[in-house]
Image (cartoon, helix red, strand yellow):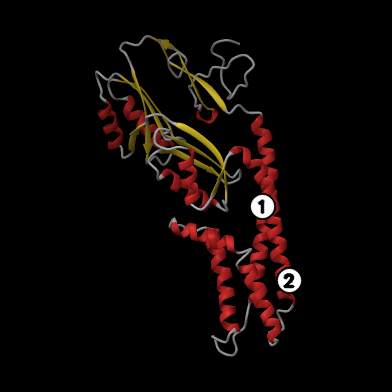
């Protein structure tokens, strides 16, 4: 017996072989529909279901009528990549060092470049990542090493909540530190003729540039290594232009009339650190509110496929699936009761 998307039961005319594949090259849900339609029209294939979000293809077929090589050729002819899946693991962990959407794209690209990683989704707001992978080819340590190589800091779930508070305190302290050193430069910015004041501005701006501003250089390095650009690159370029121009002007390398702008680089870093502080504060509040909402939702669902139970993330449930909910369990999705009460 088997169960189709309508919940109707029918007898199998022949024994079915089930195979799961990873599909690459899909750009939208229409791509998934093309693959399903092409395979569904092929004799010997009983069912083909493509999950676009996790790039997964599940095929039920009669291997006496159609071979696995033929199935792979059908998908390849449509312009997509296909690879048989030998099993999959799932890892969710926190990620520190994400600044913008470009960081998300860089990390996802870095992770998905590994052939053992099936799918990688990075959430900027929650500073987290969800990775599906082949446990026979890669493990948590190797995944964390890939994240570190991309310039970010992976964290296990148990450390995530503690780190939110630590990140808030760190951003607050860096802002106060850079502001404290920048204010004296701002207060004396009109006294360019005084050499003593000039040396004070140089020393304070140098400290700010290479302490509070060091994180932007570090982020820029990893971004450029990955052949991409993010906010860190822009900040590093802007503050470095002001600082190194002022440095050259201060020592007379640009002639006798070169003006110095040490206050510009220092205050830029202070303002950006203020933004980071406010962002960390808002993120902490949003993360806590989001966690409270997520606690109300079931994160797993138990699908009933051909009489077999299969536990999957609730986000993978799609229209037509049959979900089994036992007494006392949270219902993971909206649906129609077809059996039970």
Question: How far is the residue under mark 2 from the one under mark 1?
Answer: 22 Å
Q: Position of residue 290 (x, y in %)?
A: 66, 38
Q: Determine the residue located farthest toward the bottom in the rendered image.
A: 256
Label ID, residue 176: none
The residue at the point 25 percent across, 23 percent down is 66
- Mark 1, other Cα within 10 Å: few <14 / some 14–19 / many ≥20: some
77 relative position to 27: left or right: left
Of residues 215 and 32, which is closer to you in this image?
A: 215
In which quadrant will I find the N terminus? top left
Of the residues tagged 2 and 1, which is closer to the observer? 2
What secondary structure is found at the residue carrying circle 1? Answer: helix
Q: Position of residue 326 (x, y in %)?
A: 59, 15
- Mark 2, other Cα within 10 Å: few <14 / some 14–19 / many ≥20: some
Of residues 126 and 96, which is closer to you in this image?
A: 96
16 relative position to 183: left or right: left
The residue at the point 54 percent across, 60 percent down is 218
Figure label count: 2
Instruction: Identify whether 145 is placed above or below 20.
Output: below
Q: Which residue is mark 2?
A: 183
Instruction: Identify whether 101 is placed above or below 325.
Output: below
The residue at the point 45 percent across, 19 percent down is 5
In which quadrant will I find the C terminus? top right
Instruction: Identify whether 67 is placed above or below 151.
Output: above
The residue at the point 56 percent across, 71 percent down is 240
Q: Position of residue 167 (x, y in %)?
A: 66, 50
Q: Position of residue 207 (x, y in %)?
A: 64, 70
Q: Determine the residue located farthest toward the front in the rendered image.
A: 141
Q: Which residue is mark 1?
A: 279
Q: Determine whether label 2 and label 1 are within 8 Å by CB.
A: no
What secondary structure is found at the residue carrying circle 2? Answer: helix
Residue 37: name its quadrant: top left
Choose the circle earlier in sequence order: 2 or 1. Answer: 2
């Amino acid at each position: 017996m088997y169960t189709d998307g309508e919940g109707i039961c029918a007898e199998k005319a022949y024994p079915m072989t089930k195979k799961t594949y990873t599909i690459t090259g899909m750009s939208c849900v229409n791509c998934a529909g093309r693959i399903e339609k092409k395979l569904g029209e092929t004799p010997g294939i009983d069912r083909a279901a493509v999950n676009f979000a996790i790039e997964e293809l599940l095929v039920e077929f009669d291997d006496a009528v159609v071979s696995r090589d033929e199935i792979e050729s059908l998908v390849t002819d449509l312009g997509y990549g296909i690879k048989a899946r030998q099993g999959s693991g799932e890892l969710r962990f926190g990620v520190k060092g994400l600044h913008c959407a470009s960081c998300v794209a860089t990390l996802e690209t870095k992770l998905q470049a590994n052939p053992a990683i099936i799918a990688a989704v990075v959430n900027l707001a929650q500073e987290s990542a969800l990775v599906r992978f082949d446990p026979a080819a890669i493990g948590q340590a190797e995944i964390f090493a890939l994240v570190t190589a991309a310039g970010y800091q992976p964290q296990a779930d148990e450390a995530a909540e503690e780190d939110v508070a630590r990140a808030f305190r760190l951003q607050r302290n860096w802002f106060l530190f850079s502001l404290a050193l920048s204010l004296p430069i701002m207060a004396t910015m009109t006294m360019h003729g005084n050499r003593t004041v000039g040396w004070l501005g140089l020393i304070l701006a140098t400290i700010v540039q290479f302490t509070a501003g060091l994180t932007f250089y570090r982020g820029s390095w990893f971004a450029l290594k990955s052949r991409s650009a993010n906010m860190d690159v822009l900040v590093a370029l802007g503050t470095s232009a002001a600082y190194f121009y002022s440095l050259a002007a201060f020592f007379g390398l640009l002639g006798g009339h070169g003006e110095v702008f040490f206050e510009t680089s220092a205050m830029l870093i202070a303002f950006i650190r203020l933004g980071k502080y406010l962002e960390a504060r808002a993120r902490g509040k949003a993360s806590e509110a989001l966690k409270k909402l997520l606690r109300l939702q079931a994160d797993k669902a138990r699908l009933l496929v051909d009489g077999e139970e299969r536990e999957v993330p609730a986000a993978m449930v799609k229209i037509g699936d049959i979900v089994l909910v036992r007494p006392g369990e949270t219902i993971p999705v909206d649906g129609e009761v077809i059996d039970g009460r």
